[in-house]
Image (cartoon, rainbow, N blue to C red):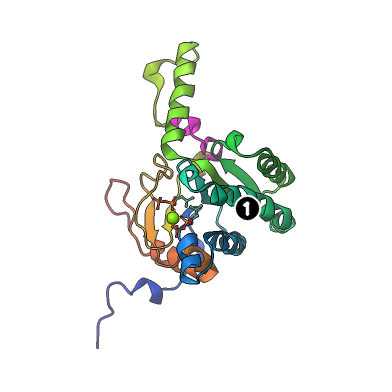
Amino acid sequence: MFSKPKEKAATEQMLDLDRIPAHIAIIMDGNGRWAKARHLPRIAGHQQGMQTVKKVTIAASDLGVKVLTLYAFSTENWKRPSSEVNFLMQLPIKFFDTFVPDLIKNNVRVMVMGDISALPAPTQKVVNQAIADTAHCTGMILNFALNYGGRDEIIRATKAIAKRVQTGDLTADNVDESVLSQAMMTGSLGDLADPDLLIRTSGEERLSNFMLWQLAYSEFVFVDQHWPDFDGESLKAAITTFQGRHRRFGGLENK
Ligand code: IPE
Ligand code: IPE
Ligand code: MG
């Protein structure tokens, strides 16, 4: 009778649990606008956004995601009013104080990328404690980008490589993609360093200095929801969209 449409709309498709992206990175955006729409102060949006982090972490872990990288604070976010920056610096304390037992229960290991030495001492302490408390966990890696900038990361990697060349540990000719990948803040993730899927909430369609090296061949999914409204279902919808994409990595389609 009728021929089937070649491609169903992403939302009609079923999530394929055998093809869950190994590394998902999320630019958690729209907290301020979420709050503004409710006539609340911006920090109320950040507070609510923290609850979303908890929900989405568990949802991703349940789906079998191997690495979930969350952009929490950029190297440019210091430009915001100090009251907002101060609140954002307190958030990891609130988050880890209540959530580390759940992370352990779900076998989730915490990792951080970014210059945490610039964070207030109590924030650094709680972050390092969470990393230590979950060091034995073998399930999903929850990687927070905190005071992270993609350009800052590239500069640091370049300096580290230049120093190795200076000391004779490496020759300039031997600098290749693998050397640079290992020098990045995701170096310890090995084959999992590059996100398969990048999600940005709030309708903005830009990278805002996020993972400039690692996102070279990632699939981008932009969703209109503000971060506090995002949830496990939104994550599944984004993964379903990802599963409808055809990644080619510069080659020809492998179907
Ligand atoms: C994302 O929400 C959280 C951080 C950048 C820390 P925003 O605070 O950027 O919210 P909008 O984009 O102003 O709505
Ligand atoms: C990116 O969002 C940073 C984080 C989500 C932590 P921003 O809200 O800071 O990005 P711009 O300023 O809109 O590009
Ligand atoms: Mg924003």
Instruction: Report if residue 63 is visible in the image.
Output: no
The quarter of the displayed image where residue 202 is located: bottom left
Q: Quadrant of the C terminus?
A: bottom left
Q: Is residue 37 left or right of residue 82?
A: left
Q: Amino acid type of disc 1?
A: Leu
Residue that appears at 53% across and 65% down? 228
Locate residue 25, reporting x and y percent.
48, 52
Name the dominant secondary structure of the magenta segment: helix
User: From what the image shows, is residue 3 above or below residue 213?
Assistant: below
State yes or no: residue 31 in magenta.
Answer: no
Q: Position of residue 71 (x, y in %)?
A: 50, 50
Query: Position of 148 compared to 213: left or right?
Result: right
Residue at x 48%, y 60% (from the top left corner): 32
Q: Which residue is mark 1?
A: 91
136 or 153: which is nearer to us? 153
Task: Report x, y in % for residue 17.
Answer: 51, 65
The residue segment tinted magenta is 178-189
Residue situated in front as seen by the camera: 60 or 251: 60
Q: Answer whether residue 179 is magenta in the image.
A: yes
Eyeballing the image, is 149 above or below 19?
Answer: above
| Helix, strand or loop status at disc 1 | helix
Q: Residue at x 28, y 79 (%)?
A: 4
- Residue 120 sits above or below residue 106 on the image: above
Residue 234 in sight here: yes
